[in-house]
Amino acid sequence: MTPAPGGRDASRAPIVRLYRALFRLWMPREIRAEVGEPALAAFEDLWAEARASRGKRAAVRLLARELASLARTGWRERFGGGGPVERPSRRRAGWITDLLGDLRLGARALRRRPGFAAVALLTVALGVGLNTAIFSLADAVFLRPLAYPASERLGLLSTERVVDSSGFSVSYLELRDVEERNRVFEELAFFLDWRSVNLSGGDRPERIAVNFVTADYFGLLGFQPLLGSLFAPGDDGEGPLEPVAVLSYGLWRQRFGGDAEVVGRSVVLDGMTFAVVGVLSPEVSDLGQRFGQRPDAYLPLTWAEPLLQQSIRERRGARYLTGVVRWRAGITEQDVRDDLDRISTELAGEHPESNRGWRLVMRPVSALMFEHAREATLVLLAGAGLVLLLVCANLAGLLLIQGTERSGELAMRRALGAGRERVVRQLVTESLLLGLVGGALGIGVAFLGVRLLASTDALRLPTFVSLALDRRALAAAVAISLLTGVLVGVTPALRAGRVEALACLRGGRSLVGGGGARAAMLSAQVALAVVLMAGAVLLVDSLRQLQATELGFDDQRLITARLDLQGERYDDPEALRAVADALLERARALPGVEDALLWGPSRLGGGNWVRFVTREGRYDRIDERIEASRHHLLPGALAALGVPILRGRDLSSADRPGAPPVALVSEALARALWPDRDPVGQRLATSIDGEVVAVEVVGVTGNAKHRMRVDDFLSADFDVYFAYRQEPERHLNLLLRFASAAGADRAAESAVVSRIVPALRGAIGRIDLDLPIYQVGTLREQLAEEEARSRLSAALVSSYALLAMALASLGIYGALALAVRQRAREIGLRLALGASRADILEHVLGQGMRVLVAGAALGVAGAYGVSRLLGSTLYGATSLDLGRLLLVIAGLAAMAILGVTLPARQASRIEPTAALQDG
Amino acid sequence: VSRESSDQASALPLAPHDFEILLSLSERELHGYELVRDIRERSGGAIDLGTSTLYAALRRMLAAGWVEDAGERAAHGPSGGPPRRTYRITERGREVVVLEARRLQRLARQSERILGLRGRGPGIGRQTPEKAP
């Protein structure tokens, strides 16, 4: 990545983006069209200046001034009061003046009750903010169509092992068969995606990602060139036979500085020269393993074999490719499935050695792209909607109390001649104001929420999905705010319109006014809060367990880097062995480095390369094969990483090429292969380059989490460690353990890393100038990244839980306080007749606690259900035990104190004389 | 005074912001950020135009033909980025700003005479005699 130029930096600042969004939303179209861009540029300049040279306070002042200017100008341009020329008409001014008057009154009413205003605004802000943030997520996931032509008929073709439905890529020969035999597809292209190659030349060598594609690929997905052309179909329909390349927009900008003359120049990839024929337009987003991520370059599929030195087109079992298909209009997905089943059956009959036990599968792109996000988004959306309803219900309750408090004021207005309609209108305007001001604050909340959602990869959104508060989201925020305002305001306003009736409301009903329905709703809120709190407790607990998981090796003070030994110079296995020794020697000699080891190809904390293994002599039994991560190591690497050898021996220098092949297996794998025998000395069978080989097991290691702690792919710790000297590997991880004196905290660690990494690059450059290292970082960083997903779930559910708790206490408070006010006379009478204040306190507390206890009982039952449900999907063994329930009950106690005691105290402080006179 | 100028005269008095903008553009072509800075500096920090106010005014003056688009210029503003659109005052605009300046000058002379400000420091005006109720 090249550093972004200053301008892009500034335009990405959150404030600038927020201003941009507000400007687009509020300014009339003509202004935006005529002077919008320069105005925004000027704002960016002013903001950058204020930030850079005039300090924080100047920046805040600037922002305040700019927002005021925006609000005023937008208003004037829309509703009149222009400048010297072309004054817009004032015809709408009449009702606007009225509205402004009501708004002023409303603002004054809110200012008079700052406590109420703060609570109400905060509640609305949370409700609107949450809904807006979730709306922009839902908008991205559901509402916007995919960027491909006829994307509803687009699918990816791959294969599946029948025995366990595990998914695999598809082989070239299988795809050719599908192409010839199918009756359902109108277009079919193949690709081999996300291979990385070394791009040499330039300042320093780089590792880039390439996709190998057939010529129809671009046309099928509707990709357009920005410069030059895309691949033209060759004679065999597979694309050009010459070595040509199409560059991505990103690589073109970054590596060639956006040079318009790039077509015709050449790039050197893994030592081979390719002529650049075109540059893709920046909008395209790719399919394949990593949806939406863009590879850096595209090469014709013809060139995959020579470049990757992998036989792709000869063996049916070489399943490396993916097919992308568009089925014909009028055909259903079921037709496609039937047709593929037919072809699978035919192939299994014709080629039993490679196709028996396999079937072809097609998955629609639309379903695939948002696989992970769709469900989560639905849940979030439902949650947000529920929260909004609770916000409205509870605020309406609060406004009702306000209505009783203001009954004097309103009665006065009626008496002075304001019609009922006018009073209602004013009250609705007030609640609309509440909604809109709260909504404006809510946009701030949404802004933070969207940043939280966008910063995580937990939802695994395709990268072209840009989560941002755009105009649609802001429009949604305004709509939600208005809706909130109306929902909240209408009932209290209509009630207040009948002020006479309200003023003499009599008691005699349950203290929680509105009877059973209202009490049930409050109990349900409490229950919901309890369930959410229990969920939050479980998620936080799961996160803690994840963090505490033993990795099975020493993860402290490790820098990891990847390197791939590509190109002709490493074709000779001897060269691979020699370079490994040289790398280790140089790395160990770096200052500050305690030890170094090479580990290939499966990556610690990340990627996974697998091989099927089984007991010797049973490799043809497909259902007995076990998928295991493979590692190729030099002697001593296990000890250096801190993986214990439980039985047998480590690899040794005697395990040379020519000597019998040996391997170590992890304890879990040993147990799966030989549950009742000593694994040391047994032989396992595996396939290397299509040939079944028997390998002697010389040792058993402890289990280790080499991939990820949360692993969707391989749940068991199945690892097999081969001897690098016997089978050298091109894909390597170089691990450096830095000296412990360097300090334990994060800052010291990153200082060490920033000293060691350049030295490492230099050292490797002295071995091979064109050899890049990439994905350089500490293991600790990788682990933190992995935790991000659990962290997000925990954060989301916790905030929902806190919100639900706050809303429930607000609801209870509102209901009880209203009841206390309405029954002030009755309470006063009781006091006058000799009831003690303690009696009254107890009475009100009892009413409130009844609601709480009913809700809590319901909630605890629900919480157990949720813990069952969550327990199976969460990391670690997590259940709701007594200790955790106590936490939840502590939360309940907080709600009780907030929601019940305040009104109870108010009730107990009623002065009988005053209350009786008031009536 | 030509007929055209008298047309322009009907636009007087100018809104203070419009006057400031035209005044700044009378010196040289500027883009938005430069305009805000120029006005700020000339007023000693007393006038700080908001971007929206500025551009709404510019748009009106573009429509009235007082100001015209002077093309794009490479940015050397603090945020870098793409070229900035600059603006230039037109002949009509110049007439308006001159007319307004004359008007203000006249006003200033009158107030000097009435308030007796000439030759004195700020704030030491001659006491005006109080009128009887």
Image (cartoon, coloured by chain):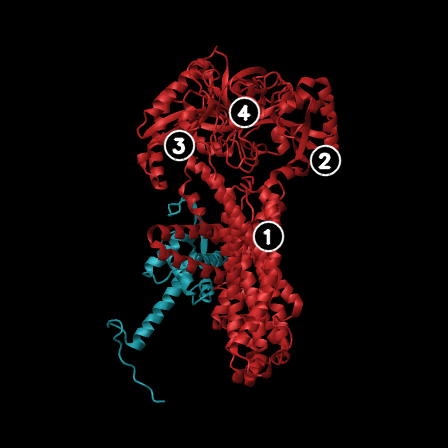
Chain colours: A red, B cyan
Amino acid type, callout 1: Ala
**x and y percentages locating residue B121 in the rendered image:** 24, 71
Sequence order check: which comes first, mark 4 or mark 3?
A: 3
Residue type of the residue flagged with mark 2:
Glu
For the residues marked 2 and 1, what is the alpha-carbon distance in whole angstroms?
40 Å
Q: In what quadrant of the picture does the C terminus of chain B appear?
A: bottom left
Q: Are marks 2 and 4 on the same chain?
A: yes
User: Quarter-wise, where is residue A477 in the image?
Assistant: bottom right
- Comparing marks 4 and 3, which lies closer to the viewer? 4
Q: Disc 3 designates what residue?
A: A559
- Tag 1 and tag 3 share a subunit: yes
Q: Is residue A364 above or below residue A28?
A: above
Mark toward the start of the polypeptide (2 vs 4): 2
Looking at the rendered image, the disc whose residue lies closer to the viewer, 2 or 1, is: 1
| Residue under pointer 2 | A333
Q: Which residue is mark 4?
A: A670
Question: Callout 3, which amino acid?
Answer: Ile
Q: Chain of mark 3?
A: A
Quarter of the figure with the N terminus of chain B: bottom left
